[in-house]
Image: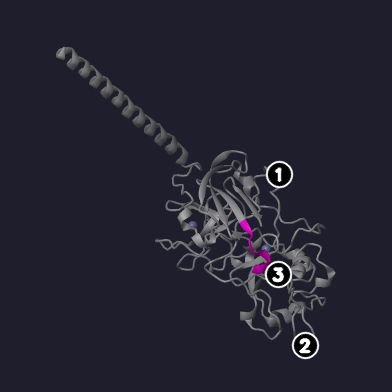
Amino acid sequence: MSDIYFFRKNIIKRISFLVLKIFILSILLFILIRCSSNLKKSAPADGDEVSVQVNPAYFIKEGLVEPITKVDYKLSDGSTVACYKIVTKTTPTEHTMGPWCPTNISDGADKGGIWMESGKVYDVDGAFVKNLATFYKDAKWKMYRADGSIMVTNTKEACEAAARPNVDPAYQNFCVQCIPSYVSGLKQIFYIPVTPVVAPNQESNIDNLPPGPPQGAGNNRPVNGERRGPPQGGRGPQAGASTIGIAFNGVNFDPPAPTSDILKHYTLAPLDDNGGHINPHAGYHYHAATGKTKKIKQADGHAAMIGYAMDGYGMFELLDEAGKEPVDLDDLRGHYDAIRGYHYHVGPAGGNKFINGFRGKTGGFSASF
Ligand SMILES: [Zn+2]
Ligand SMILES: [Zn+2]
């Protein structure tokens, strides 16, 4: 009786041990499979020896509406990859915004922002405004009254009427500015590939940035903030790369400001000293990198990092710590090194252009209240 009892007990013990063994083995196998698929996922997708992933920790938390998450997202070519979803407040937290327009022709540079012309940056101070007819060799420029006060769009309605292609004639010869309170509550959503993926036919990537606005368009598309739809030419509606990239404060680096449209109507839409201004529909955004946003210093003296392009490649300042420009940039304004992988160097502040095109497939961007 007791023998049988012990025999049975032994069998049960052996079986439960076997079940436990199988259980542990399957868990190990599961983990192994997961790991290998993860490895596959995070392998460099751009074919470079060194491929650097987007680092969400670089972003300033105060600029985010919610923590950055990883989601599957359809890129510009329709392929789906892991992207960071970055929801931002379009409000810088490391610098103030403005001023943009001086109010009197006697105002100093501290009362106004900057303007870009022919690759150069000019202070928009009172003297600059007073001198516009000479500067642009056109006597129709006169943005100030007999008492020296400068015509500035001082209401949301004025900012909207002046910041569109068919500028309300009443706002010709106005300095156009929109202030932060007009766009409070606006948020932007960026989808940026975790690991950059090179787009095929790189030659055709040159100038594959979002197109500038059509000349003389008669819609209500804003001029000064210029938010546009996705680029033409076969890019899906999700492409939506109507922005170049994102600064670590969550503000977007935008395509060139349509300065010829702005000037055609005898208006100025100055940037502040940080290189940004406000559009009533899309909020604060940059057209120039003037060194005022958060930077990631590089240990080897290379130019500091200032953000990410919409294809996930890093965006760096133009000059390195010795004040030198890189000499081997490709047509897109990028190059490769073994520390940073492929990355871009933005154009000079007066150039009204951050980069010339995307090397990689781009994620998506939208702005809404
Ligand atoms: Zn703009
Ligand atoms: Zn570099």
Q: Give the labeled residue for mark 1.
A: 233
Q: Residue at x 26, y 24 (%)?
A: 17
**Badge count:** 3
- Asked if ligand 1 lies within 8 A of label 3, the reply is yes
The location of residue 338, given as percent across then percent down, is 43, 51
Q: Nearer the viewer, mark 3 or mark 1?
A: 3
The answer to whether any part of residue 196 appears in the image is no
Front-lying residue, 5 or 171: 5
The location of residue 24, given as percent across then percent down, is 31, 29
Q: Which mark is residue 41?
A: none
Q: Which residues are magenta?
A: 180-187
The location of residue 3, given as percent across then percent down, is 15, 13
| Circle 1 crowding by C-alpha within 10 Å: few under 14, some 14–19, many from 20 | few
Q: Which mark is residue 269?
A: 3
Please report whichever mark, 2 or 1, sits nearer to the chain's N-terminal start: 2
Please report whichever mark, 3 or 1, sits nearer to the chain's N-terminal start: 1
